[in-house]
Amino acid sequence: MYNFDVEMPTTIADAVAALGREEAQPLSGGQTLIPTLKARLAAPSVLVSLHGIPEMKGVCKNDAGQVCIGGATTHATVAADAAADYPALASLAARIGDPAVRNRGTIGGSIANNDPSACYPAGVLASGATIVTNSREIAADDYFQGMFDTALEEGEIVTEVKFPVPEAAHYEKHLQPASRFPLVAVFVAKFADGVRVAVTGASENGVFRWTEAEEALSANFSADAVAGLKADGSEMISDLHGSGTYRAHLVGVMTKRAVAAMG
């Protein structure tokens, strides 16, 4: 690592002010950032920790019936505290990484980083969630813009994520055992006005909605409805863990399993 200073703000306003310093970078759970610093792939002069901001922590339900999660809330807390109101989201959080990662990593850090194989982006996108920052609200469909790319602007931080609660939902994850990232995972959410299907771990462009499956499931919510569908494999990730063709196949398999699990 290179030398850097650490700021420990206790309010969102103070964090935003600290991030206005030259070469300042936010630190949430640090599960990606710290290894990056150790490898000397980044050299910020200041890290602004979001860990000590109480207003960015916790899980609650608002008057609109949405499950609201503070940006600095750990995966372990989401797994425990969202279980009653949004079991599928809690299940997703409970299977991220290992206990050390779940007790340190945060939802805000995960979706700000937007790793193409991260779990949370699938849950956020399939739920049609709203990402709240220090300056605005962004719909999930507008937020994720590609591999490691989001709608966040310089100095903008995720303070909360608001999840509409579907009638039923399930997250099906094909685990890459070494990293515990999904090789391919699918989050299916059934709402009164239709079905949303989000896929992570598969595409070179990051998380995406599988619209063909959404249309089929909205017309007939059963595993049979997607049995004949094939995801486009032309832009799928191809690496030592699996080819693009294999990942495209897994998209269909994971979607059918998710729907079947929802009964």
Image (spheres, helix red, strand yellow):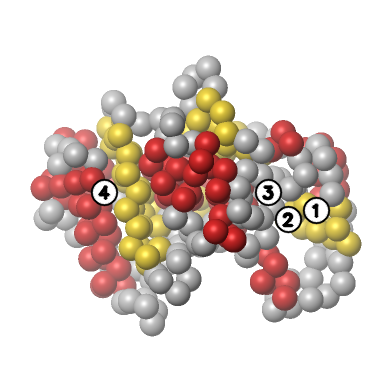
Q: Residue furthest top?
A: 63
Kindly report which numbered mark, 3 or 4, lies closer to the viewer in this rendering.
Answer: 4
Which residue position is annotated with label 2?
Answer: 27
Characterize the local packing of mark 2: few (<14), some (14-19) or many (20 or more) Cα atoms within 10 angstroms: many
Q: Position of residue 223 (x, y in %)?
A: 15, 47
Which residue position is annotated with label 3?
Answer: 153
**Disc 2/disc 3 C-alpha distance (Å):** 16 Å
Residue 48, which numbered label? 1
Q: Earlier in the sequence, mark 2 or mark 1?
A: 2
Q: Three-letter amino acid code at disc 3?
A: Glu
**Quadrant that contains the C terminus:** top left
Q: Three-letter amino acid code at disc 4?
A: Ala
**Disc 1/disc 4 C-alpha distance (Å):** 39 Å
Residue 75, which numbered label? none
Horizontally, residue 35 falls left or right of residue 85, namely right
Which residue position is annotated with label 4?
Answer: 258
**Disc 1/disc 3 C-alpha distance (Å):** 16 Å
**Disc 2/disc 1 C-alpha distance (Å):** 6 Å
Circle 2 sits in a helix, a strand or a loop, which is it? Answer: strand
Which residue corresponds to the image point at 68% horizontal and 65% vertical from the top-left? 33
Q: Position of residue 48 (x, y in %)?
A: 80, 53
Q: Are marks 2 and 1 in contact (CB under 8 Å)?
A: yes
Characterize the local packing of mark 4: few (<14), some (14-19) or many (20 or more) Cα atoms within 10 angstroms: many
Which residue corresponds to the image point at 31% horizontal and 73% vertical from the top-left? 244
Circle 1 sits in a helix, a strand or a loop, which is it? Answer: strand
Q: Three-letter amino acid code at disc 2?
A: Leu
Horizontally, residue 141 falls left or right of residue 14, namely left
In which quarter of the view is residue 245 placed? bottom left
> Is residue 138 visible in the rendered structure shown here?
no
